[in-house]
Image (cartoon, rainbow, N blue to C red):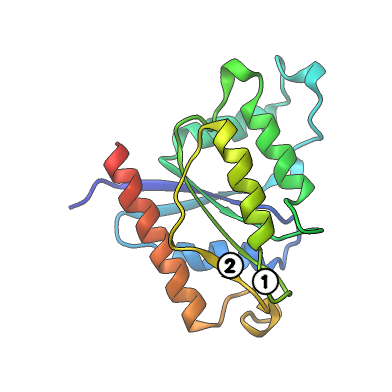
C-alpha cells in the first residue's frame, strides 16, 4: 500500500455556501485510498499585525501547527477583483511570519478554484503562484482546475454537480498525493 497522505485544505472564502468550500468537499470525496483531506476554516484568523508576529494569537499557532502536520496543502480560492481574496492572503502572511518560522516552507501544494465568471480563477491562481515562490511552497502546474461559470456546475449549497469538474479535481488530488509521496 502507498504511504498514507494527509492534505490540509484551505478555502479562500468565508461564505458557508461557498462554491470553493464545495470544491474542497468534492476533493475529500474523490481522494484516492490512503489520502485524507482535512480542512481549516480561516474565519477566526485576525488581521495580520507585525507587532504580534512573535507572540501570535492561539488560532494562528493552531493554523501553523496544522500546516506543519499536513503532508501537503490544497488551496481552493475564489477570485476577487482579479486577484487573491484578502482573507487568504492574510492567512498566508500569518503562517509565513516571522521569516525564521515559515510554516509553508517545502510543502507540496496545489491550487483549484471556481468562479461565476467565464475564466474561473485563472488570475487569482497566477497571483498565488507568485506568492508561493517566495514562501518555498512546491506548487505543481498540471492539472489545472479553474472552474468557470460555477453556478452552472454547483447546486445552491455550493456542492459540485458537474462530472467533468469532479474528474479534474480527482486528478488534481491524485497528482498532489503522488508528488507528495516522492518528497517523503
CA distance for labels 2 and 1: 7 Å
Say whether residue 129 is left or right of residue 157: left
Residue at image coords 81%, 25%: 49
Q: Position of residue 39 (x, y in %)?
A: 56, 50
What is the secondary structure assignment of the residue under circle 1? loop
Q: Position of residue 72 (x, y in %)?
A: 44, 43
- Residue 30 appears in the rendering: no
Q: Position of residue 41 (x, y in %)?
A: 66, 48
Q: Nearer the viewer, residue 123 or 112?
A: 123
Classify residue 113 by image quadrant: bottom right
Q: Which mark is residue 87?
A: none
Rate crowding at label 1 as few (under 14), some (14 to 19) or many (20 or more) other CA atoms within 10 Å: some
Q: Position of residue 100 (x, y in %)?
A: 58, 15
Quadrant of image for the C terminus: top left
Q: Earlier in the sequence, mark 2 or mark 1?
A: 1
Say whether residue 168 is left or right of residue 41: left
What is the secondary structure assignment of the residue under circle 2? strand
Rate crowding at label 2 as few (under 14), some (14 to 19) or many (20 or more) other CA atoms within 10 Å: many
Say whether residue 52 is left or right of residue 69: right
Q: Nearer the viewer, mark 2 or mark 1?
A: 1
* Residue behind mark 1: 119
Contact between marks 2 and 1 (CB within 8 A): the answer is: yes
Q: Which mark is residue 146?
A: 2
Amino acid at each position: 500500500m502507498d504511504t498514507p497522505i494527509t492534505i490540509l485544505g484551505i478555502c479562500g472564502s468565508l461564505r458557508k455556501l461557498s462554491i470553493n468550500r464545495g470544491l474542497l468537499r468534492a476533493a475529500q470525496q474523490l481522494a484516492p485510498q490512503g489520502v485524507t483531506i482535512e480542512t481549516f476554516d480561516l474565519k477566526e484568523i485576525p488581521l495580520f499585525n507585525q507587532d504580534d508576529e512573535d507572540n501570535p494569537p492561539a488560532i494562528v499557532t493552531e493554523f501553523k501547527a496544522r500546516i506543519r502536520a499536513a503532508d501537503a496543502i490544497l488551496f481552493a480560492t475564489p477570485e476577487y477583483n482579479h486577484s487573491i481574496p484578502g482573507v487568504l492572503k492574510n492567512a498566508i502572511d500569518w503562517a509565513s511570519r516571522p521569516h525564521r518560522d515559515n510554516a509553508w516552507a517545502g510543502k507540496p501544494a496545489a491550487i483549484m478554484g471556481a468562479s461565476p465568471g467565464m475564466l474561473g480563477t485563472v488570475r487569482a491562481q497566477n497571483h498565488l503562484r507568485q506568492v508561493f515562490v517566495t514562501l518555498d511552497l512546491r506548487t505543481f502546474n498540471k492539472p489545472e482546475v479553474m472552474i468557470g461559470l460555477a453556478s452552472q456546475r454547483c447546486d445552491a449549497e455550493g456542492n459540485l454537480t458537474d462530472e467533468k469538474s469532479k474528474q479534474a479535481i480527482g486528478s488534481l488530488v491524485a497528482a498532489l498525493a503522488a508528488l507528495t509521496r516522492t518528497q517523503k
